[in-house]
Image: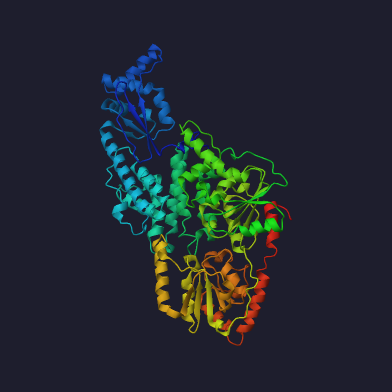
Amino acid sequence: MTAPLHPGWFAAATDPLVRVLVLHRPGTEPPALDPGATSVGVRPLVLEPPTDALPALREARVRAASLAAARGRPAVARVVHDLKRSADLRRAVTGGVDLVVSADPTLDAALDGVPAVLHGLPLVRSADVPALRTLLADLTRWAERLEAVVEAAGDPLAVADAELAPPPLAPVPGAPVALLVADLTRRLAGRSRTLGGRAARLGGRVLPADDASDLASGLAAQDAAADLVLEADPASTDLDRLGAVARGTLAAADAALEAGRGQVALALLSDALLLLFHRELHADAAGSPLVDAPERFLADLVASTTFRAVTTGGRGPLVRDRDPQERAPIAVVTGAYGTFHPEVVAALETVGGLEVEVVDLARRQTFSGKPLTADSLAALTLLRRWPAGPGVPDRERLRRTETDLLRDLAAVGHDRRAVFSDWADKSTAFLSHALAPGPRLSMRVHRVDAFDPWFVLTDWTRVSELVVVSPAFRDLARALLAVLGHDVPVRVVPSFGSIEGLARPKPPQARTRLGLIGWSRRPKDPLWAFDLLERCPGYTLVCVGAPPNGAAVPTVAGRAYHAEVDRRLAELGDRVEVIGWTDDVPAVLQGIGVILSTSRSEGCHRGLIEGAGSGAVPVVRDWPLLASRGGPHGLVDDAWVVTTVEQAAERLVAVTHPDTWPAAVTATAARAAELFDGSDADATYVEVVLGSAP
């Protein structure tokens, strides 16, 4: 760490977002404030007269100054005197309070006379307490309405604005209304990012325009993320503007952290991360600033004090250190994105002769959700063991959180010789921070996980080796790690699967039948295949796998894309045959003469590999999202790769000429057997996991 941290920032990470001190005089009751569903914590403080005596001369001077500050009003002067002498007030306003509420007009007048005693904290005067009470009640009713909307589990894009919009929120002098609104929409986004983004946009409209407040509350970042969900063309997003919003949000997080407001800092960091790593910018797009210029795109994030505190601060892992035993079992941790770990388990057991235990962290409650939340970041800070300072944390909650985390992680970290974690997901990120020195930790990145915030939240100092499934992702992973300041060995181990038995004799009619295996998601880009089909009369297309379900896509652009897929399918008619998922892949591939890879990006395209293994001649798009990192080159034969639909049409016509196609089928099957021979993969996995050759 290069910047000092407020000693109580981690303790504050479990506090309410807004900590209110209600100041009242002896013999009076503090005004009742019900936080309701808001993240407001209320603490009363009675302004007791000081019990310690000052030297007579100094006491006289203090009283004289108090009378002057009270403009000659003795009753107010006595309160000013008590304010200036109160050690309890001084401790409160400098160690965990965000807002001060005055209980009566005399206190108002006294605080006006000596504003320095509040150390710059905003003040809600007694006359505004009813308005503050109304504000909290209005926010609570809104929160209850939002809860009902998300519980109804309807289409998040079809919910009426009136159901998501807050009621009119009258500003209360001194009250952080924008921060409270952003907190409710942030919590909603933890359940549904689309609903949360829409509510944030609507919430911002009822507040006075204030760019600084929008950044400091997180509303600006939430609104920018909502743009990516609700705009028809996210590819046209102004990245400079988006970067400025992220930069301002991170700066606000760092300012909150420096002031000891850990909960606010973590909330703002989560807003910035969810904006910077939005799927519409990367995983679902045809181009990505994270791929093409990661050092520029992530510069503000890696410079953030809050980000560094979460990922590298603290005293180290919670899990007790144990020396790994030579014959201790290996733990293979599953992932949240897909089930590819069995091939690693089989390699370790058959080639390595190792005892393997599969740990399904991704299915446990603590790690079951993929989305990032501020609570997830707070849990990471717990794993980093930041000391609880004078921020008055909820000790019971801290202990419960620690117990839950350790319960889930203990099964991985104890008595293991080594740990292999599949996917750079939430469970892997948590494990990297919790695993004590001793067991060797290696992990594998496939595709989508490289574009999620969990990748950058991983403690890479604890990872001994990273496996990726293609040369393009090796190049990208190295670039990302360099930006993060880490030099972790990265090894390519493609996930080929088996192509044995796929090369069957193809009937003559297969020559003009194109195959696309897996086409339900936008990154597969079936529209590119339709464009090719329209340029090449006389060919048909076989789409293997579940068809797209546009209604399940939570973004406007995604819905529009799938609506266009449906429209084009109707236009193409019987030129496109849709086959659902099948267990008899060899039979389907036998009737396909050309296998397509039309994707915007791929990790290791199993459908393409299986098709080529059957002898179907490949036409492979130069995956545009990864083009700057080599795309499919290095994984497949360069002769198979094309850049445009026009080039694809030329290759298609050339390789399917009746005189040359049979030979091309034979040559493709032979070349696939060379390229996709995974016989070395098993031994490589053992070497990666153990750190030495089997």
Residue 251 visible in the current orientation: no
> Which percent across, then down, holds residue 665?
62, 80
Q: Is residue 364 left or right of residue 569?
A: right
Please give the name of the residue rendered at 55% of the width and 84% of the height, measured from the top-left corner: 509
Q: Is residue 674 left or right of residue 122?
A: right
Q: Nearer the viewer, residue 128 or 679?
A: 679
Please give the name of the residue rendered at 55% of the width and 57% of the height, measured from the top-left corner: 450
> Which percent across, then down, holds residue 539?
50, 82
Tell me: residue 88, above or below residue 609.
above
Please give the name of the residue rendered at 65% of the width and 69% of the height, measured from the top-left corner: 676
Number of dots carrying numbers = 0
Tell me the quarter of the image containing the N terminus: top right
> Which percent across, then down, holds residue 421?
60, 52
Residue 427 visible in the current orientation: yes
> Which percent across, then down, holds residue 433?
58, 44
Colour convention: rainbow
Tell me: residue 140, above or below residue 198.
above
Tell me the quarter of the image containing the C terminus: bottom right
Tell which residue pokes out farthest to the top in this image. 56
Tell me: residue 28, above or below residue 554.
above
Tell which residue pokes out farthest to the front in this image. 583
Q: Is residue 31 left or right of residue 540?
A: left
Tell me: residue 236, above or below residue 371.
below
Tell which residue pokes out farthest to the bottom in this image. 659
Image-quadrant location for residue 291: bottom right
